[in-house]
Image (cartoon, rainbow, N blue to C red):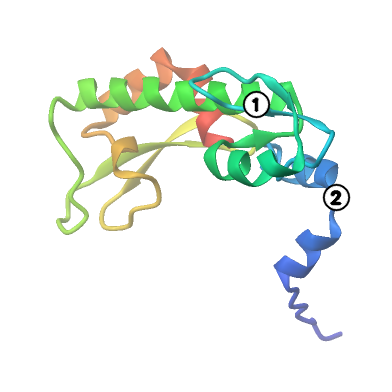
Amino acid sequence: MKNAILIIDVKEIIVQLNEKQLKQFYNKPVIFKPTNGKTSYYINNGVYPSKDWDDREIESYSRSFTVFPTGEAAQLAVDIQKAKNKVRYRIAELNEGWAPDFTDNTTKYNIIIENNNSLNLSTSIVVKVLPSYMYLKTRDLADQLIKEMPKELKLILSE
């Protein structure tokens, strides 16, 4: 029996999924364009008021704000951003001015989330897979961050 390779155009598949299916598939908020007369939610300074849209507002608001179909999706986006800010600030404190240099051969430490939703330590030398601010100088610092901020790390790494 021969193995077959199936090549799928991902854009074509995504177009065929509706909004609810996309949200379930990615398990994160689906950013969309509001429609006339439908209530949607947008983020403005960390608040997500609802809004009934009219045609003239749709274009300007969709370009100015991130718009969500539900208040829960908007709140999740706010929570993720807050977690990113907290983790970024804490890593900067722990690293005490150190920044990763991917042109040298030193080990850099970062945190990953496993399929079972557990946090684990990973290392890199020259390959950058996360934003630079997500790398720590030592294994001990990475372990400390996992102990201090598991909820925030899981939220941003499972995004």
Residue at image position (48%, 21%) is 45
N-terminal of the pair, mark 2 or mark 1, is 2
Q: Is residue 32 visible?
A: no
Q: Which residue is mark 2?
A: 18
In this picture, residue 120 sits left or right of residue 54: left
Residues 82 and 137: in front is 82
The amino acid pointed to by label 2 is Asn
- State if disc 1 and disc 2 touch (CB < 8 Å): no
Q: CA distance from mark 2 to mark 1?
A: 19 Å
Quadrant containing the N terminus is bottom right
Label annotation for residue 74? 1
Q: Is residue 117 visible?
A: yes
| Label 2: which secondary element | loop
Crowdedness of circle 2 by 10 Å Cα count: few (<14), some, many (20+)?
Answer: few
Quadrant containing the C terminus is top right
The amino acid pointed to by label 1 is Ala
Crowdedness of circle 1 by 10 Å Cα count: few (<14), some, many (20+)?
Answer: many
- Percent across and percent down for residue 51 are 72, 25
Residue at image position (85%, 50%) is 18
Residue at image position (47%, 33%) is 120
